[in-house]
Structures are given as structure tokens and as C-alpha cells.
Amino acid sequence: MIKVLVAEDSPTIRAFLVSILETQPDMRVVGAVANGEEAVAAVQDLKPDVVTMDIHMPGMDGFTATRRIMETLPVPIVIVSGMMTDQVAATFRAVEAGALAFVRRPAGIGHVDHDAEAAELVMTVRLMSEVKVVRRWRRPPPLGSSSRAGTGAGEAAGGRRRPRLVAIGASTGGPMALQTILSSLPANFPLPILVVQHIANGFVEGFAEWLRLSSGLEVQVARDFTATLPGHVYLAPDDRHLGIDRNGVIRLSDAAPESGLRPAVSHLFRSVADQVGADAVGVLLSGMGADGSAELTHLHALGATTIAQDKASSVVHGMPGVAIDMGGASHVLNPTEIGAKLVTLVRD
């Protein structure tokens, strides 16, 4: 039985969320609280398996409560957010504080989107309950101006051919890993970076803005037929696969979901293998399942540099772990090391 704590200041919404979760035969809501202080205390007293957390609450807000919980008695936290701009922005502050996942607050009963959004909430809580150990790593300090030099265009310093593109795939635990990696790259990083991050619909624009502000790189949601540029990061949009053509132009696709996923890391890595081949760098970060694992292994076989996140720093070591087991990783590193390796690859 999955024990859930619900933190939400609105009595109506709190009862609504409880009713959705209590209908599940494998879930029991052990507490429902109205603010952050109560949430921190309830985690200590009730020992829930998962916490669903509102952001805007009186007194201690969801961001502060998340940070306190992660400092004292870490437990998987799912942010349940409205879609107002300030709520989306605050959601990513909570991710930075340690929240593992975020979902849109389900629409009311009778709304056309209610069933799908309620099912997403239930699925996310169920998946997060499987995360038994919540791991964190420290974000590296910003690079000084001297560290940002020396990554101009041309061949790498060692004379070998420099990669043309970086492709990154991530799921659960990916946002903080990705932020750590991007924050360690220089502003003049000479390669475009394509990213598929499994994320709830409606959050990708806010995700791009959070990464842009926290990393200093140009981060944007990918648009079809856009020519990729060095030092720019392109995120897969909601419900479309991300790929690239041989000229470095982004191609989006409405092809069928792969293993229920669209966008899928598998689609991105296949596209990169076909169009860029050995001149790519493939990176597979924390996530459940095996999306992208076989395709990273294929990139490795083509001669591309491939990197899998290590188990110690992964929230969930499914995707990178499968790739490692398949022999598909040239390097197994934590996010800080991945950022350093990417810098090395364009210098050596």
C-alpha cells in the first residue's frame, strides 16, 4: 500500500486530490494538510511514501517545505501545480530544492481533460513510490571568465575530429541533472545540444526558461525547420518527437509514441545516429524504463562518444543502467563530471 501525504491550502482542491488518490486500491492518503509547516511535521509523524505538494500556501510555501523535507527526512515529492506563469516558475524552484516530479493539477470532474490528468497524477505518485532512496548532488560553482575561453570553432586541440552535436535524453531525476550539466558549460560552447526530457505537458516552456536563467545558455523549445546553432539548447516540445537532418536542421515528428512516449529519447538518438553518426555525443541521464538505451548502444557501436549517468547520482538508474548493461556507454559519470567531459571533448 502506497502511503500518500497531500499538501494543499484550498480545502476544495485538497478534498478533490484526496478523492482521486483514495480511489486507487494500492494507495492510502495518510494525511491532508493545508500549509508547509504542517507538511514538514506530517512527514516526520506519518512517514509517507510520497508527498504531493502545492506551491502557493500561506505561511511556509511549497518550495520552502520541499527544501526542509529534503534536508531532514527525504521522501519523494510530486509538485501538483496550476498552469499560471508564476506557479510554473515556482515549480522549478521546488525541483531545484529536491522535488522529483511535477504534474498539472487535474481539471474538475466533467472536464474533458479530467480523466487523463487524474490518471497522470496517479501514475506519477505510483512511480515515485518506487524511488526508495532520494539522492542529491551539489551544483558546481559557475565557471569564471578564464574557464569560458578556448572553445572556438575548428578541430579539437588534440587534432582529432571534434563532435558536431550533443544529444541528451532524460526522465525521472533528469531536470536537476540537466541543469547541473548545462551550468558547467561555457557560454561559447561550440556545439548545439538537443534534449528530450520526459515532462508533463504544459511545463516545457517554463522548463526552458528555468534552464536558461540558471545556466546562462540559450535554451529554447525546439521548432520545426530551425537551423541549430552552437551553444544553443533545444528541448523537445510537448507531444512531438525531436530529430535532426544531415544539415543540422531540427525536424519534429508526429509519429506514433514509442513505448507510450512522445517525445521519445529513442527517436532522438536514432535520428542522430542516422544523420550525424560517429560525430555525435550521446548522453543518457536518470530515468525509469529503457527509453534510449538500445539507441545509445547503437551510437556507441557507430563510434560516437556515449555517456551514461552513474548509479550513485541517479534518482532512478533505469535508462542509463540498461545502456551500461548493454555495453553502450563510453563513460559512466555523474552530472558534474558529464559537464566537464563535454568541455574536454571540444578541447582535446
Image (cartoon, rainbow, N blue to C red):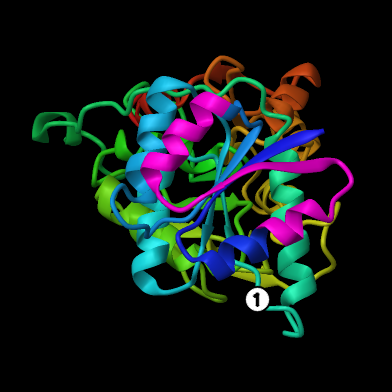
Instruction: Give the residue number, with chain letter if any, for mark 1.
Output: 107
User: Which quadrant is home to the C terminus?
Assistant: top left
> Where does the image place residue 59, in percent across and percent down from the top left?
28, 51
| Dot 1 amino acid type | Ala
Magenta residues (range):
18-45
User: Which quadrant is home to the N terminus?
Assistant: top right
Residue 22 is covered by the magenta coloring: yes
Question: In this view of the protein, can residue 342 be seen by the observer?
Answer: no
Residue 331 is covered by the magenta coloring: no
| Residue at position x 73%, y 29% in the image | 318
Q: Is residue 129 above or below residue 90?
A: above
| Residue at position x 31%, y 47% in the image | 60
Question: In this view of the protein, can residue 17 be seen by the observer?
Answer: yes
Q: Say left or right for 160 vs 15.
A: left
> Where does the image place residue 98, in percent across and percent down from the top left?
44, 35
> Where does the image place residue 295, in percent across and percent down from the top left?
76, 39
